[in-house]
Each structure stands twice: as C-alpha cells, then as structure tokens.
C-alpha cells in the first residue's frame, strides 16, 4: 500500500505516482489471460514506466521519433520495437534503416509509406519486416484495395510482409463489437490467402480493452477477457499480437492534488485544487458529472458536504468533479484520484496558463523515486526575441 501522507510530505502536490508493484501484478494478470499471444505495449499510454514493463511484454509500439528517442535512451532493444505512426518522417526512417538492422518491424499506413520503405530498403540493402495497417474507416491505415495492391505489387526481396495490423479505438465494452472485428479480420485474411496466394503470418490486433474509471461502472473483467480469448481462437494458425496500452497501465497511477481555497455562492460550494484538467484527464468523463475512484488524506469522519472540485486554470471548464459528497474540506486536504496511469500525464492541456508540470514519482515497496521534477512551462510559452 502506498503511504500517500509520506508521498505528499516528500514531494508536495500536484504529483503523479505510478506504483511499480501494481504495474507488475497487472502485467502478470494480462499475460495469464492471454498466454497464447504476444503483448505489445503502446508507448503513448505512459512513457514513464517503459523500463518497468520491458520484461513483461514482447514489443513496444512506437509512433513518433520522440517516443523512439525515449525508448532508445532507456536501452530498449531494437528487436522489440515496432515503428508505427500515421506520419513517418523520412529522415528519421532513413536513419533507422541505415543504422539499425535489428528493428523488429515497421508498419505501413499508406501507399506512400510503402514507397518510402521500399526505396530505403533497396538503397541500403536492408531486410525489413512490415505489418500493413488496415483502416477501420478513420485516418489511420489503408483500405482493403491498397492493402491488396501492396501485397500484389511487392517484389522487393528486402521487404517481408508479415501480416496485418488493426486497431479501431479504445474503451470497447461490447464483446459483440470485438467479435465483429475479429470476424472481419478472418474474412480479409481468407480472401487474401485464397485470391492472392499470399500467407498472412501475423495479426497485430488492438482490442481497445476497457478501463472503468467511475464508481457507478460495473464490470466483470475476468469474464470479459475470457470471452475475448475465446473469440480470438477464431483466428486459427496465425501469430496474434495484442496491442495494449490503457488497460495495462491505468491502474498503477494516482494523482495527488490539494485544496488551496474554499468558497461558496448561490450555485454551491467550491474547492479549488492546485491541479486541474491541465493534468487530470479521465476518458469518458462528461462535464465532470461522474465520480472517479478516489480517497482523501487526512482521513476524517466529519459531516459530509457537497462540493464542486475545480482546478487552478482560468477557465470555467476546469472542473474535475461536480457535486461530490465528502467530509467537510479544509485547505491542504488532498485528493488522490485513482486509475490515472494511462495518458493523463500527457493528455492534459499542459501549457495552458503557464502552470508547472507536476512531479512524477515511481513507487515500489522499497522506494519512491522522482523520475520527473517540476517543469516550468513559462519557459516554453516565453517568446524569445
């Protein structure tokens, strides 16, 4: 258990805390549920726990040069990297192909990306393995026509097309939707193998596993994952890699933010916190009406009152939770918001009002390590003449 009082005393607020022990338990749990498949970690979900995840996943999905730089500095092996992303900068890709023969795979998200990889692999006589991303109807990936065109036209001995990548979104609660997607992938694979005499060896699939952030949500995760495992068995004789981000890291994260002011008007009581929506983001939060999982320190048994929890930004939109019933608040009381291990630290409107980026701490049973100190955004927002 995290001693939040100790964390607050040492690091102040606002602060993100990522619990390494919870993360390792979560990784083991998902591997036990999907022991027949490779786990692929989507780096964009949380870059601060990459090293702690390394031994528990087979691959890292990297979608920008910045994400690559982070993984490279953390000494992640290139043979675990899948270089993905809708925008592949030519100079970055050329540098990788020229200097690193051990990059595991590249994805193809357009015919132009295929042309780029085709050109560079020939230029440097470099063998590369690729996955072609199939679109779900948005801006990512290629349609069926382009998918088949690339497979038909590829005569480059340096390019090996391993299979298909498919991801249609996050927070999928419907097993029927997942079944529909898996059936669709089966149809595409069968069509290609029969009509193009080409064997699809692998499918990298992003199931978009749901995370339940709010107290009124009900979810039997064991049952859900067991059913998904049964659905995936429809894809026979193929290597299946599951791209997971949010579901893997969400539960390891907490966000500490303290009350700095209290006020009341005709619309109710307001608690102003030293954090805000520039840091804390819950997917699916609607006008701050849902109550996430949280606790308050110090714990107390005072009569409960109803508050609106607001952040420190000069915008009426900076509301974390509306109409939450808690023991009477005082200045310096601290809220610990749970399940913020995925995206929250990078998804907020961090530069708004030039407020500082919060500290980030890695917690384990034996230590609390500061992995990012406060960052002054005023230096980023300053116009240097």
Image (cartoon, rainbow, N blue to C red):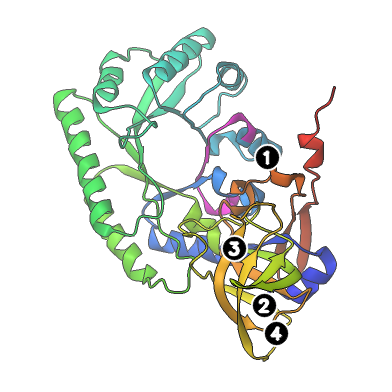
Percent position (x, y) of residue 128? Answer: 46, 23
Residue 272 picture quarter: bottom right
Determine the secondary structure under disc 1: loop
Judged left or right of residue 274, residue 138 is: left
244 or 194: nearer the viewer: 244
Image height of 212 relative to 323, above or below:
above
Categorize mark 1 by other alpha carbons within 10 Å: few (<14), some (14-19), many (20+). Answer: few
Task: Please tell me which residue is depicted at 46% across the width and 29% down the height of the picture.
Answer: 86
Determine the secondary structure under disc 3: strand
Task: Please tell me which residue is depicted at 51% across the width and 70% down the height of the picture.
Answer: 291
From which residue to which does the magenta span run?
53-66
Mark found first going from the N terminus, 1 or 3: 1
Judged left or right of residue 345, residue 13 is: right
Mark 3 highlights which residue? 320
Mark 4 highlights which residue? 299
The question of residue 56 being in magenta is answered with yes
Categorize mark 2 by other alpha carbons within 10 Å: few (<14), some (14-19), many (20+). Answer: some
Mark found first going from the N terminus, 1 or 4: 1
Judged left or right of residue 332, residue 284 is: left
Mark 1 highlights which residue? 75
Residue 260 picture quarter: bottom right
Determine the secondary structure under disc 4: loop
Residue with the most extreme left position: 194
Q: How far, Cα to Cα, is label 1 from label 3? A: 37 Å
Mark 2 highlights which residue? 296
Q: Where does the C terminus fall, quadrant-wise?
A: top right
Q: In the rendered image, is residue 233 in sight?
A: no
Percent position (x, y) of residue 228? Answer: 30, 58
Judged left or right of residue 131, residue 179 is: left
């Amino acid at each position: 258990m995290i001693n939040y009082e100790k964390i607050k005393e040492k690091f102040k607020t606002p602060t993100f805390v990522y619990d390494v022990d919870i993360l390792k338990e979560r990784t083991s749990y998902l591997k036990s549920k999907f022991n027949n498949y490779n786990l692929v970690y989507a780096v964009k979900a949380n870059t601060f726990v990459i090293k702690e995840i390394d031994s528990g996943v087979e691959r890292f999905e990297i979608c920008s040069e910045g994400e690559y730089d982070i993984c490279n500095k953390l000494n992640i092996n290139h043979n675990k990297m899948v270089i993905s992303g809708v925008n592949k900068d030519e100079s970055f890709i050329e540098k990788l192909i020229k200097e690193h023969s051990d990059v595991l795979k590249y994805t193809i998200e357009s015919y132009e990306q295929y042309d780029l990889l085709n050109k560079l692999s020939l230029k440097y006589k470099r063998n590369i393995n690729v996955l072609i991303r199939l679109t779900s109807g948005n801006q990512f990936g290629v349609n069926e026509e382009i998918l088949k065109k690339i497979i038909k036209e590829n005569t480059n001995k340096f390019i090996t097309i391993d299979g298909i990548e498919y991801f249609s979104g996050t927070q999928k609660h419907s097993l029927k939707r997942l079944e529909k997607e898996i059936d669709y992938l089966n149809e595409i694979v069968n069509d290609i193998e029969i009509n193009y005499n080409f064997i699809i060896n692998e499918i990298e699939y992003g199931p978009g596993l749901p995370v339940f952030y709010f107290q009124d949500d009900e979810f039997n995760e064991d049952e859900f994952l067991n059913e998904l495992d049964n659905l995936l068995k429809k894809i026979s004789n193929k290597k299946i890699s599951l791209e997971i981000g949010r579901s893997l890291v969400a539960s390891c994260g907490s966000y500490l933010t303290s009350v700095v002011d209290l006020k009341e008007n005709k619309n109710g009581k307001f608690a102003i916190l030293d954090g805000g929506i520039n840091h804390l983001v819950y997917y699916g939060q609607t006008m701050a009406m849902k109550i996430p999982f949280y606790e308050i320190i110090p714990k107390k048994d005072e009569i409960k009152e109803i508050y609106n929890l607001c952040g420190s930004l000069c915008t009426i939109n900076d509301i974390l939770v509306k109409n939450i019933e808690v023991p009477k608040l005082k200045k310096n009381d601290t809220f610990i918001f749970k399940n913020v291990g995925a995206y929250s630290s990078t998804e907020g409107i961090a530069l708004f009002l030039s407020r500082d980026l919060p500290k980030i701490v890695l917690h384990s049973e034996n230590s609390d390590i500061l992995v990012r100190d406060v960052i002054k955004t005023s230096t980023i927002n300053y116009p240097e003449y």
